[in-house]
Amino acid sequence: MKLMLFFLLPLLQGNLTVTSPAFDNGKHIPMKYSCEGSSINPPLRVKGIPARTKSLAIIVEDPDAPQGTVDHWVVWNIRPMPLIDENTGAGRSGRNTKGENKYMGPCPPTGSHRYFFKVYALNTMLELPEGVGKKELEEAMKGHVLSSGTLMGTYKKEGVHK
């Protein structure tokens, strides 16, 4: 019975609750966090982090891009914390779709797009070099995800304002 509970424990942990003091789930992401603003990551609150968590990972993507899903932020080895500050340098940065190792703010060419901020609680620190992409991160996370949660925000360009 103990062995069975050990394998079921990640399932019993529940999902992370991911929110932001900057915008509500399903609502507009403020311009500050977009290509029209400072293009810095918004603050993220993470609740329900399992006790066994060794690190957090974040993937931010836009599935509405005309050329296919655009990766806006790939970061891992963030120490478990309930608030990830805006414009953070925490963790190790991976390659976004532009080939840069940093957060890339929402910048849809037309219309409103959805941006998914996916946060993962991992039972390990990942041995990945800076600059790997989303696929390499997802592969390295296999078997290590204790819990995860998603915050979705939308963005539509308002005009060029810096």
Image: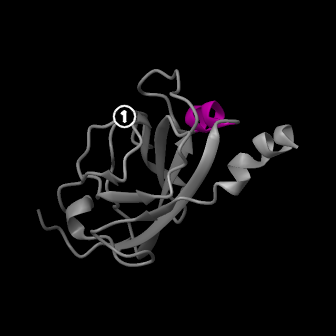
Q: Position of residue 37 (x, y in %)?
A: 18, 61
Which quadrant of the structure image shows residue 131? Answer: top left
- Going 25% across and 70% down the picture, which residue do you hit? 30
**Residue receiving disc 1:** 91
**Relative to 18, is 33 on the left or the right?**
left
**Relative to 132, is 7 on the left or the right?**
right
- Position of the N terminus, as image quadrant, is top right
Q: Is residue 33 above or below residue 72?
A: below
Which quadrant of the structure image shows residue 156? Answer: bottom left
Give SS at disc 1.
loop
Tell which of 120 and 72 is nearer to you: 120
- Position of the C terminus, as image quadrant, is bottom left
**Relative to 137, is 79 on the left or the right?**
left
Q: Position of residue 140 (x, y in %)?
A: 62, 30
Q: Is residue 88 above or below residue 47?
A: above
Majority secondary structure in the magenta region: helix
Q: Position of residue 2 (x, y in %)?
A: 82, 40
Tell which of 57 and 64 is nearer to you: 57
Q: Is residue 66 above or below residue 5?
A: below
The region drawn magenta spans: 135-142
Query: Disc 1 residue type?
Result: Gly
- Going 50% across and 23% down the picture, which residue do you hit? 128
Tell which of 17 and 33 is nearer to you: 17
Whether the magenta-drawn stretch holds residue 138 is answered as yes
* Residue 66 visible to the viewer: no
- Going 41% across and 76% down the picture, which residue do you hit? 111
Q: Residues within 10 Å of mark 1 (few under 14, many from 20)?
A: some
- Going 72% across and 47% down the picture, which residue do you hit? 9
* Residue 135 visible to the viewer: yes
Which quadrant of the structure image shows residue 26? Answer: bottom left
Q: Position of residue 58 (x, y in %)?
A: 46, 47
